[in-house]
Image (cartoon, rainbow, N blue to C red):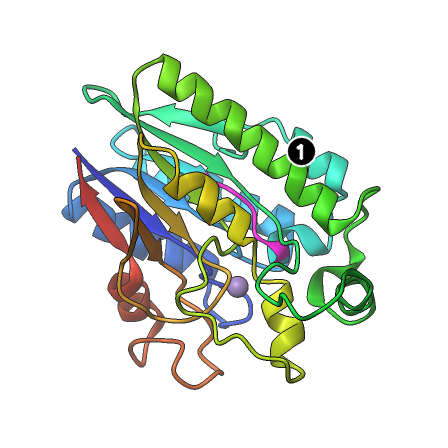
């Protein structure tokens, strides 16, 4: 059994036709023998387009590959409120849900995640909020709580999922959009780095996942960097973001499909 993971395809920003991308990716996944494919957010800047792409990809793959997705801040930003993000009803949406891999003891738990400015420890809460709501791409998303409170909710939801997985004696893979570990973040007190680091994710998430023995693999995106697999307390962390063509060094090849293939991780279970 093989499962695949990818994030941050940004099909619209990369000017890639989404139907073409889905057909090419479907062919590749079928040839590679992947039986479940996980999309970790930032497919596009519009939820409806992201959902169209996911359902079209699943159509191409028919019953041979199960497709699941979670949302990144780009997918969320034009169309959805926090409450809507939490309550999307779709068999493909893995946020705060899980997929048990048939014939194995593996469970894949999905959670969009969020950020709490924890990767910029020198920045105070008020400055973080000013940056998020004043300038950051996802400032438009309506939420009734602070970013720290939103992250608290995310961690509580994940803790509950991990407890259930433990009770069911599952080995766990977690997929999330935002960054859980600081290994590839250059901590800085200079703007704009300090501000951008603040909205990358939460070190509290990494601590929770690394400290939970049944979690063996964690996949994430959001931070468009290429880095080796990072090990923490026996848990492997993978950044599978494809990133943006227009920014130097993000794509690993001249074309989208090769860049996607190079960042795609296929895990044999
Ligand atoms: Mn992204």
Across the whole image, how many numbered discs are drawn on residues?
1
Residue appearing at x 74%, y 41% in the figure: 82
Count neighbours of disc 1 (C-alpha within 10 A) and say few if under 14, some if 14 to 19, many if 20 or more: few
Q: Name which quarter of the figure residue 259 lies in.
A: bottom left
Q: How far across and how far down the image is residue 202, in percent?
A: 56, 53
Q: How far across and how far down the image is residue 64, in percent?
A: 25, 31
Q: How far across and how far down the image is residue 267, in percent?
A: 20, 44
Observer-nearest of 191 and 40: 191
Observer-nearest of 155 and 24: 155
In the image, residue 197 sits, relative to residue 28, either above or below, namely: below
Query: Is residue 262 among the parts visible in the rendering?
Result: yes
Observer-nearest of 202 and 78: 202
Q: Name which quarter of the figure residue 151 lies in.
A: top right
Asked whether residue 72 is drawn in magenta, I would say yes
Mark 1: secondary structure: helix
Q: Which residue range is magenta in the image?
A: 69-73
Q: What residue does disc 1 label?
A: 86
In the image, residue 77 sits, relative to residue 71, either above or below, namely: below
Q: Main secondary structure of the magenta part?
A: loop
Observer-nearest of 225 and 254: 225
In the shown orientation, is residue 265 left or right of residue 113? left
* Quarter of the image that includes the C terminus: top left
Residue appearing at x 51%, y 45% in the figure: 205
Asked whether residue 189 is drawn in magenta, I would say no
């Amino acid at each position: 059994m093989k499962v695949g993971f990818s994030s941050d395809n940004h099909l619209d920003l990369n000017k890639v036709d989404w139907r073409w991308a889905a057909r090419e990716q479907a062919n590749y996944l079928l040839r590679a023998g992947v039986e479940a494919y996980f999309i970790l957010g930032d497919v596009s800047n519009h939820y409806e387009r992201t959902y169209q792409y996911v359902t079209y990809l699943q159509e191409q793959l028919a019953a041979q590959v199960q497709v699941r997705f979670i949302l990144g801040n780009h997918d969320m930003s034009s169309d959805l409120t926090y409450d809507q993000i939490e309550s999307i009803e779709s068999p493909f949406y893995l946020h705060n849900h899980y997929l048990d891999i048939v014939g194995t003891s593996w469970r894949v738990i999905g959670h969009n995640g969020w950020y709490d400015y924890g990767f910029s420890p020198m920045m105070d809460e008020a400055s973080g909020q000013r940056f998020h709501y004043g300038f950051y791409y996802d400032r438009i998303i309506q939420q009734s709580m602070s970013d720290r409170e939103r992250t608290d909710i995310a961690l509580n939801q994940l803790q509950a999922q991990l407890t259930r997985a433990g009770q069911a004696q599952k080995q766990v893979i977690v997929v999330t959009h935002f960054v859980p570990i600081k290994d590839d973040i250059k901590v800085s007190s200079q703007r704009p780095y300090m501000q951008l680091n603040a909205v990358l994710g939460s070190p509290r998430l990494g601590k929770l996942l690394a400290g939970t023995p049944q979690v063996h693999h964690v996949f994430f995106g959001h931070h468009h960097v290429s880095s080796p697999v990072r090990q923490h307390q026996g848990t492997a962390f993978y950044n599978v973001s494809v990133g943006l063509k227009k920014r130097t060094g993000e794509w690993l090849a001249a074309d989208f499909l090769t860049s996607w293939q190079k960042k795609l991780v296929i895990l044999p279970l």
